[in-house]
Amino acid sequence: MKAAEELDETVVTAADAAVETIQREMTSFARRARASAGRMHPELSLVSYTLLGHLEERGGCRATDLAAHYALDKSTVSRQVAALERSGLIERRLDPEDHRVQVLHLTETGTEILAQVTESRREAFRERLAGWPEEDLARFASYLLRYNAAGADEPVGDPPTHA
């Protein structure tokens, strides 16, 4: 029985070490992502980029929907939205089904800037991952999908495949 207890302790210790490494590396990744956002576009923070991407993906939404989706305080989203409006990247439109509701949409400029920044980010990832075998890239994509889906309302999807 003692050998089994020692084995369990080793597994827990290895798992704890792995979790610690993951936490440290994800913190480092987040720090680099925030720092590089300004280089991609000086007026577009990582949060702003994320909000623009969500608006594009959804075809527009309310500020309260953004706050709920990203678990952000409404005042935080309000400040971000105001800055994006001042920059001419988003605009408010009345909801055609309920004229009391304002829906946020990308402007033409917002769509163009988002496309440029997205391509710059994609190229930065390509460069960083250039030496990785295709199998490692697929596994990494799968792990990220699984991690990000944990605790989310969205099901775990398969990573995109390229023919």
Image (cartoon, grey):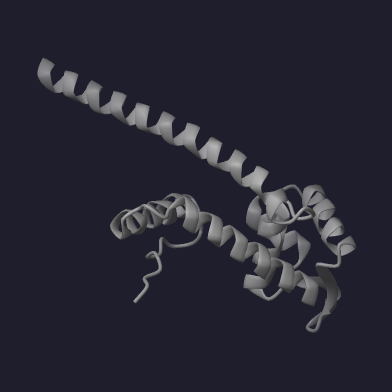
Residue situated in front as seen by the camera: 97 or 18: 18
Question: In this rendering, is residue 108 above or below 24?
Answer: below
Location of the C terminus by quadrant is: bottom left
Q: Quadrant of residue 121?
A: bottom right
Q: Quadrant of residue 57?
A: bottom right
Locate residue 29 relative to residue 97 in the image: left or right. Answer: left
Q: Nearer the viewer, residue 111 or 144?
A: 111
Looking at the rendered image, the quarter that the N terminus falls into is top left
Q: Is residue 154 visible?
A: yes
Q: Where in the figure is residue 59, as x and y percent of width and height?
A: 68, 76
Q: Residue at x 76, y 72 (%)?
A: 106
Can you say whether 120 is above or below 11 in the image? below
x 50%, y 39%: residue: 26
Residue 100 appears at what percent x and percent y?
87, 74
- Please determine whether, in this image, residue 3 is positioned above or below residue 54: above
From the top left corner, tell me how far across and down residue 81 is, in percent. 81, 59
The single residue placed furthest to the right in the displayed view is 86
Instruction: State the count of labels.
Output: 0
Q: Measured along the vertical axis of the image, is residue 98 above or below residue 1?
A: below
43 relative to 70 in the view: left or right: right
Q: Whole-percent x and y of residue 87?
A: 86, 62
Q: Can residue 107 be spotted in the picture?
A: no
The structure residue drawn at horizontal position 65% and vertical position 65%, both measured from the top left corner, is 53
